[in-house]
Image (cartoon, rainbow, N blue to C red):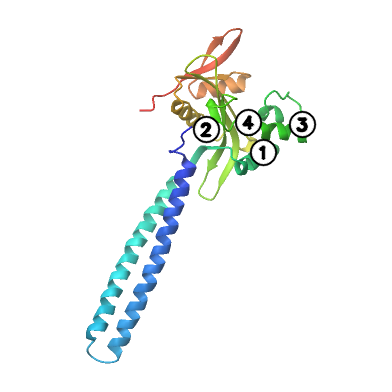
Amino acid sequence: MADASSLVRRRRQARQELAGARTQMRVQGSLGVVWAALAASQSADGDDLGWTGWAWAVLAVLYLGLALASWRRLRREEARLGELVGVDLVPVTEAVLARLVAAALDGADVHEVVPRAAPGERWSPEQVERLRAFHRERRAGLDGPGREATWAVVEVAEDEDRVVGGARLRKAGEPGVLEAGLWLVRDARGRGIGRAAAEVLLQRAAEAGASRVRAAAEGSGALEFLRGVGFVTVADGERVVAERRVPDRT
C-alpha cells in the first residue's frame, strides 16, 4: 500500500536536504575564505590588485554569496524538520520488527498484542515468535494470502523516532469494508497518539479503496476510544462492532 505521504519518509528526506545544505554551505564558505585570502595577499604585495587579484576577489564574493544562500536554505530546512513531528505508520521490515517486539515486551501485555492470546498470559519465547511470524506473514499486504496488512506505530519527535505500537487492516467478507486493529505501549496511551494513529490508519484504508472500517468494540475503554475517533456501534450478526466511514481521499 502506498505511503508516499509517510511522515517518517518526509522527515528522512528533510534530514537529507538539511545535510546537503550544511555541506554546501561549508564547502562554499571555505572556498570563499580561500579566494578572499588570496586576494588579500595580492593586495598586500602592492597597491594594484592586478587581474589575478581581481579574479580572486570576484570568486571570493561569488562563493561567499553562495554560502549565504546555502545558510538561508539550511535555516528553511531546519524549520521544516521541526514541523515534521507527530505519529506515523511504517511497514514492518525486519529492522522495524525488532523494535516493535522490544516495545511490546517492555510496554504491553501479551493479549493486547498477540492475536488469540488470552488475558493473563505472560510473554514467552513462543509468544514472541508468534508475534514475529504474524507480521512476517502479512508483509504481502491486503492482496497477499493473509488478506491483511500491518504497520508499526511510530511516534516521530524532534530527537528520535520511537516505535510505540502496532496497527493492522484486514479484508472483511464484505466488499469495501476493512477490519482494523490498534495497540499501544502503556506510556503512549492517553497522549493523543492513539487518535493520531487511527486517523493515519483510516488514510491507509482510503488508499486501499475501502469505504468503511470496522473494529472490535471489546470493553468499555475500547468502545470509548473508538467513539472518540468517530466510530459508531453497529450490529454484526450476534456481536456489536464499531464502524466508521472512510474519509474521501480528495
Q: Residue at x 44, y 28 (%)?
A: 207
| Distance between mark 4 and mark 2 Cα atoms | 22 Å
Residue 137's tag is 4
Position of 187 compared to 2: left or right? right
Residue kind at label 3, given as amino acid type: Arg
* Residue at (24% x, 80% y) in the render: 54
Task: Check disc 2 and give the amino acid type.
Answer: Ala
Is label 4 in contact with label 2 (beta carbons under 8 Å)?
no
Residue at mark 1 to residue at mark 4: CA–CA distance: 15 Å
* Residue 101, disc: 1
What label sits on residue 122 in the rendered view? 3
- Disc sitting over residue 197 in the figure: 2
The answer to whether any part of residue 124 appears in the image is no
Disc 3, disc 2: CB below 8 Å? no
Most extreme residue toward the front, as rendered?
Answer: 145
Report how far apart the C-alphas of labels 3 and 1 lie in the structure.
14 Å
Residue 54 located left or right of residue 158: left
In contact (CB < 8 Å): disc 3 and disc 1: no
